[in-house]
Image (tube, rainbow, N blue to C red):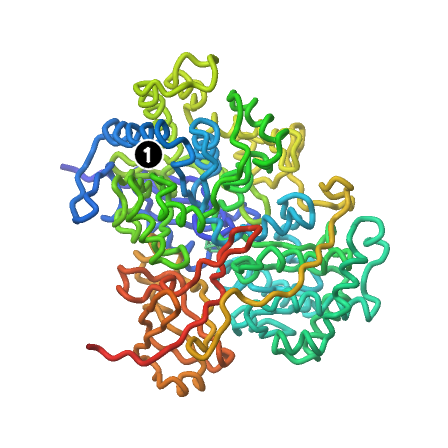
Amino acid sequence: QTTQPLRRLESKSACPYCGTGCGVIIEHDGQHITGVRGDPDHPANFGQLCSKGNTLHLSSAGEDRARAPLQHRRDSEDWSPLAWPQALSRIARQWAEIIHTQGPQAVALYVSGQLSTEDYYVANKLAKGFIGTNHIDTNSRLCMASAVTGYKSSLGMDSVPCSYEDLDTADCLFIVGANVAYAHPILFRRIEAAKLRRPELRIIVADPRRTPTAAIADVFLPIQPGTDVALFHGMLHILIWEGLVNRAFIEAHTEGWEELKAQVQNYTPQWVAEICAIPVANLRAAALTFGQAPAALSLWCQGLNQSSHGTDKNVALINLHLATGQIGRAGAGPFSLTGQPNAMGGRETGGMPALLPGHREVVNPEHRAEIAALWGVERLHPQPGYTAVPLFQAMERGEIETVWIACTNPVLSMPDQTQVQRALEQCRLVILQDSYLHTETAAYADILLPAASWGEREAVVTNSERRITHLQVAVPAPGDALPDWVIFRDFAFALGAALDTLDHPLPSAKDASWTARARRMFDFTDSASIFLEYRECTRGRDLDITGLDFAVLDARGPQQWPYPQGAQAGQVRLYTDGVFPTPSGRARFRSPEYLGVAEEIDARYPLRLTTGRLRDQWHSMSRTGKVAALFTSDEEAFLEIHPDDARRFGLRADALAKIRSRRGSSILRVRLNADLQSGLVFAPMHFGRRYAPAALCNQLTLAAIDPLSGEPEFKHTAVRVEPMHFP
Ligand code: SF4
């Protein structure tokens, strides 16, 4: 037997981790991924990759990949294989029976920002168009939903107005609630390079923790958690007093100014400094730095979004840009960073319970009619479905009888994990579609469906700057694993057949049967056919991509939307003409009051816990957990605490501590950090039961959500700590 030499092949793709969306060239031999390198032609990263991206090839294969559909007895470790037709028809029979007897509102999907745009589109069409339920939400609810509601509320549409190249030309960067150095490392390198090139660039960082991002700050504001609205109103108060607002822009392009001006009059520097626990001088320095900059760009992420007042925080920050005319120009604008590789694709395709494809709204009758016509259905349900936290609560009440979870791990990532576990235990049928076998959620699944992963499917994704990248297939998926959209499509066919056996009433005589309806609606042969249907949903909308197809993306490289028919390039920046997509054409000043956190500290729970990301880990570590090098800086979960607090509560460095909240407890190793403000503790979000059975930080967090965005308050939980002794 002779050994065939490996033939090195290459395919273009994008990194499946953060929303920076770096271009990656996958090196492979046609069967296995053998290496990766940054794509020098990709405008997000110009060839650079961070520690996670650089080790992608080490994370893609492995024994824990799901290779065949499996059925599971929940009270055991027994997993037995099923053929695809068997698995899908078994699920379809149960879903059809639930839909027939309880109605479509008894079924739900919970999907993920890891899905491609095509996957999102087909899942959404399956739920809202075919089944008739709007109960489809995404784990992006946990990271950027407040930015969506913030943009829509202030600017009229969920459209990120900026581009990465604005990082190169901004005179002031206001980074708030974002540890860019860890969560978006390649963007941070770009910021560092800009600072080296132009020492006059001023950087303001506001964060309760002195993160590595704060190391490059000219002005650092270690604010109390949850006080962002007060901070922004306080800065605006100073800008007005100092005459640094742009009256011409306000008069020509905005509405609501007088109301906001009257409100922020009360946010005096002294009062705001007390609320935020920062010196007045630093508050003034931040306001003047922002207000005097020729071009000011703000960057934010979970620190603003993961809050019971996340929308308020977003609109209060956008107010600063509108008041100073810092939008629609090079180097200026409010720039929300996305956490996941295709959180933006989910927003675009309407993969959330209140949205429809093409930035349309479920509650808008015209939008419903437009999408119903495109999908060839009679009507769409007019009520938004449940967002993530209420969805799992409805499951616990028995209102949702079955859930289909795709490419996410809610048992680890949702707040108040115990409630999520109770909900899944209560649920009649839990389907888990994933590339991996051993997630915390798998223990609650009745059926696991194997999904193709990164490098194994063709698709597009959109990054934080609205840039769409075409992902080429490099290698085949292992075993019987299939692309997510194929699984959704084939399930639609199986569900149609099952509904026909029950004589479930058809909405009209347009289709001869549910089987025929499914065949017509999901007549997709490949990823390109889905993309072409989806792009029709964008025609004439703010995110119009009717000028794009896979050939254009391959020939011209990744492109930003909008990219309408006839365009030669995407649009770098939005609102350059000062016209906003609101009924009046004006951006709207919003006037939220500062409200405290959802769960205040008290004598029993005297510390404030905030959670976040590590530089080298990603989500619940299904991928990064396989790469030894990514454990070099942080080997295990930990609790960061100020040495004074550690002394006060009897904790020692490296010893174990028990952390308790009103919902549960967690055991973490103590790490002292004198840079952390006293009274605040920090735990990373990634580690699950596979790494330490009791080190789950979301046992502690609470399910309080923003009333508009539905995003949970991960950034503040009242806790107490005590030394932990082995029994
Ligand atoms: Fe991947 Fe984000 Fe790192 Fe780029 S910055 S390589 S997208 S994890």
The image shows residue 157, relative to residue 182, as above or below, that is: above
Tell me residue 593's x, y (percent). Answer: 67, 63
Element type where label 1 sits in the image: loop
Q: Residue 490, percent across and down?
A: 35, 27
Is residue 663 at least partly visible in the picture?
Answer: yes
Residue 536, located in which quarter of the rendered image? Answer: top right
In this view, the residue in front, 399 or 352, is: 399
- Amino acid type at image mark 1: Leu
Name the side, left or right, on which 391 lies relative to 231.
left
* Residue 708 appears left or right of 260: left
Which residue is more in the foreground, 562 or 365? 365
Q: Quadrant of the C terminus?
A: bottom left
Position of 213 compared to 155: left or right?
left
- Locate residue 136, reporting x and y percent: 45, 40
Q: Nearer the viewer, residue 641 or 723?
A: 723
Q: Is residue 22 above or below residue 5?
A: below
Q: Quadrant of the N terminus?
A: top left
- Residue 576 image position (x, y, % from top left): 75, 46
State the residue position of label 1: 482
